[in-house]
């Protein structure tokens, strides 16, 4: 066998070996969350993930829980950045957020927390997704757990009729279209409250849910507070003009308050009204002068 043939054979063997290792490497870590593993196995899996440079991993102590249990959540961060916590978000089978928390990361990259399933937001059976995010949007992972022994989710509400002048994902408030999305209920009406610079949204909710509203700045601006049935709510996320509020079953009204809301009469309409009033006053004054007796 000459040197040229030997070199070609060596190249082929190297390529085959590389493909074999790559295939095994890709298949070994398909599941990034170690659900129900022992602590030793879970931490071993997390360490192996770090070798793959997976930014964050998360797992739980069991795969299923009752509605009065504590969920033990564990995780590992690949590259610890000082001052950055891990954000834990839990999404229910209704696709609504039931819990949000920020966890401090230890120096070795590990973190842990507990979640109490006894709250009203956890009452439905089904799959709950626990999401872990660390810093940027691409540094995330999730694990799913099952809750059993509670209430089976059976939605009974209907999608509300929407004004033809607005889109299917918009509500009408005093003739203005406001984008929205809702789970766990239905919007029945919406109005603008010019006295309080707010949008008042009436809903029918038989389940716990989430409402997201994104009014344009020409309709409302400077949003800083949300009232749920007249009480200030802490389960709210406000990002610029996007408002997400979690509400319990039975909620009837959500009011979003800002520093500005479009007047009931637009600027042009107000100017026309002012001109009309001035004209009426002028005509009335002229009429009174014309009928006064002259001496």
Image: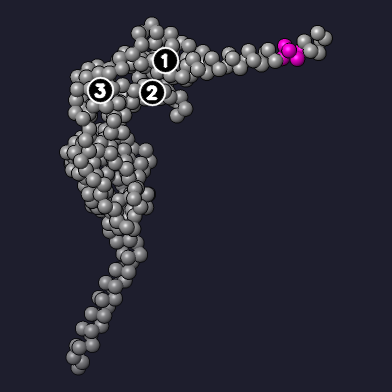
Disc on the earlier residue, 3 or 1? 1
Callout 1: helix, strand or loop? strand
Marks 3 and 1, how far apart in space?
Answer: 24 Å
| Quarter of the view holding residue 236 | top left
Task: Identify whether 235 is placed above or below 286.
Answer: above
The x, y position of residue 60, in whole percent, is 33, 16
Badge 1 crowding class, 10 Å Cα cut-off, few under 14, some 14 to 19, many 20 or more, is many
The x, y position of residue 79, in whole percent, is 48, 17
The kind of secondary structure the magenta stretch mainly shows is helix
The x, y position of residue 31, in whole percent, is 43, 19
Residue 215 as seen in the image, left or right of residue 247: right
Question: According to the image, label 3 marks what residue?
Answer: 147
Badge 2 crowding class, 10 Å Cα cut-off, few under 14, some 14 to 19, many 20 or more, is some
The single residue placed furthest to the right in the displayed view is 2
Q: Is residue 71 magenta?
A: no
Marks 3 & 1, CB-CB < 8 Å contact: no
Marks 2 and 1, how far apart in space?
Answer: 12 Å
Disc on the earlier residue, 3 or 2? 2
For the point 18% across and 91% down, the residue is: 293
The x, y position of residue 18, in whole percent, is 62, 15
Decide which of 25, 265 is in the foreground and name it: 25
Question: According to the image, label 1 marks what residue?
Answer: 76
| Quarter of the view holding residue 184 | top left
Q: Can residue 231 be seen in the rendering of this structure?
A: no
Decide which of 216, 275 is in the foreground and name it: 216
For the point 32% across and 69% down, the residue is: 272
| Quarter of the view holding residue 258 | top left
Q: Can residue 149 be seen in the rendering of this structure?
A: yes
Task: Identify whether 131 is placed above or below 61.
Answer: below
Q: Nearer the viewer, mark 2 or mark 1?
A: 2
| Magenta segment boundaries in residue numbering | 7-11
Marks 3 and 2, how far apart in space?
Answer: 16 Å
């Amino acid at each position: 066998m000459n040197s040229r043939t030997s070199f070609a054979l060596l190249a082929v063997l190297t390529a085959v070996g590389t493909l074999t290792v790559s295939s095994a490497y890709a298949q070994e870590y398909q599941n990034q969350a170690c659900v129900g593993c022992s602590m030793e196995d879970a931490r071993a899996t997390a360490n192996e993930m770090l070798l793959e440079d997976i930014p964050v991993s998360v797992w739980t102590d069991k795969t299923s829980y009752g509605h009065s249990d504590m969920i033990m959540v564990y995780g590992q961060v690949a590259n610890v950045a000082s001052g950055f916590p891990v954000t834990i978000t839990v999404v229910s089978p209704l696709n609504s957020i039931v819990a949000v928390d920020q966890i401090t990361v230890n120096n070795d990259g590990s973190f842990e927390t507990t979640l109490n399933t006894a709250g009203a937001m956890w009452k439905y059976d089904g799959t709950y997704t626990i999401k872990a995010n660390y810093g940027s949007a691409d540094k995330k992972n999730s694990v799913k757990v099952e809750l059993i022994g509670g209430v089976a989710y059976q939605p009974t509400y209907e999608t509300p009729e929407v004004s033809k002048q607005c889109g299917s994902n918009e509500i009408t408030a005093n003739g203005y279209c406001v984008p929205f999305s809702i789970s766990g209920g239905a919007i029945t009406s919406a109005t603008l409250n010019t006295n309080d610079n707010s949008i008042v949204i009436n809903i029918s909710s038989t389940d716990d849910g989430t409402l997201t509203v994104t009014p344009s700045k020409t309709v409302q601006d400077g949003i800083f507070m949300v009232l749920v049935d007249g009480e200030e709510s802490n389960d709210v996320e406000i990002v610029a003009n996007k408002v997400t509020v979690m509400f319990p079953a039975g909620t009837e009204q959500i009011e979003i308050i800002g520093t500005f809301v479009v007047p009931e009469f637009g600027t042009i309409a107000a100017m026309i009204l002012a001109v009309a009033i001035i004209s009426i006053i002028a005509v009335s004054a002229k009429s009174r002068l014309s009928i006064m007796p002259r001496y």
